[in-house]
Amino acid sequence: MNRRPLLIGAAIAAASMLALTGCASGDTSPGNDGDKTPAGADYGLVTDGTLTVCSEVPYVPFEMEGGDNGSGYTGFDIDLTYAIAQKLGLELSVQDVSFDGLQSGTTLIAGTCDMGASAMTITDERKANIDFSDPYYDSLQSLLTSTDSGIKSIDDLAGKNLGVQQGTTGESYAKENAKDATLVQYPGDAELWPALQAGQIDAILQDQPVNIEHEKADSDYKIVEEYNTEESYGFAFAKGEKDELRDAVNKALKELRDSGDYDTIYDTYFAAK
């Protein structure tokens, strides 16, 4: 019997099986550009392969310029979303936007980004327009003023100008508990802090970690009171439009907590020094 035709036939059959196996497996290796499925293709991303995050910058220590993750920004929120993006096999892009537009849901519905990460407290009011991830940070509110202001508590604000960030829970708390003060709204901390330093306002009521950064930066200012408002931050998503992405983010967040990587990021910004 002539074995050469049999060997050739076996080789052809093996090659055919490999080809069929390759098609069935949907090979997504970097070298296979033909049928490659981009990372995050099922998440309805603004840009394939990239997690686009909206945030109001600066809001130290949560959001600030710098870092080495390729987005141009860093901070607790940014570093955490970068770690989540890596878990999902995605690049990270950060868009600097107005917090008011973000917390109202309009920026998310417009499709500017895939999710919001901007030290945003989960509230029932916001849930009407936004889907939130699982909580990722617990925060307090606090009152920051100059050391020579004579202000020792929220009860000393009668007739004073109290700075707040528009659309925040700090503003809501001030409206309910500092009714004798004149509330002065600002777009963000980038305007609040210079206004306090310039004497345009007498105090700032906002998230505790941000006020701590100002207190550390300038000894002429101090936190005189803290308020436990039982707030938790969550990542924000367009209402009813990003369920798959939200589930994936929650899973990645849990994995980061379980592995200890969340604690490493947290300690970078909040561990006592």
Image (tube, grey):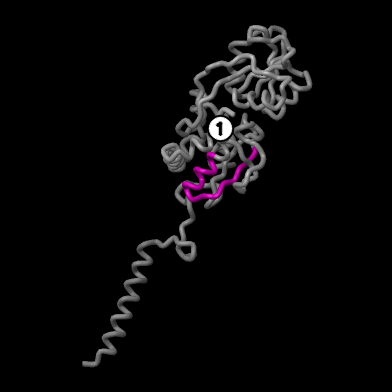
Q: Which residue lies furthest to the bottom in this view?
A: 1
Q: Name the residue under label 1.
A: 105
Q: What residue type is labelled 1?
A: Gly
Instruction: Give how far across and how far down residue 47 sits, in percent.
Output: 56, 50
Secondary structure, mark 1, is: loop
Quadrant position of residue 164: top right
Q: Check the image and name the residue furthest to the front.
A: 273
Q: Nearer the viewer, residue 163 or 144?
A: 144
Q: Is residue 166 visible in the rendered structure shown here?
A: no
Q: In this view, does 211 lie above or below 22?
A: above
Residue located at (36% from left, 62% from top) = 25
Residue in front for this viewpoint, 263 or 23: 263
Q: Which of 69 and 261 is in front in this view?
A: 261
Instruction: Please provide percent x and percent y for residue 70.
Output: 61, 48
Give above or below for 53 relative to 225: below
Q: Residue at x 65, y 38 (%)?
A: 96
The span picked out in magenta is: 80-96
Q: Let me know if residue 82 is in the magenta part.
A: yes
Query: What x and y, as percent, mark residue 179?
Result: 64, 9
Quadrant of image for the N terminus? bottom left
Q: Residue at x 72, y 27 (%)?
A: 191
Instruction: Relative to 176, say whether 253 is above or below.
Output: below
The quadrant holding residue 170 is top right
- How crowded is the residue under tag 1: few (<14 C-alpha within 10 Å), some, or many (20+)? many
Spot the residue most to the left.
1
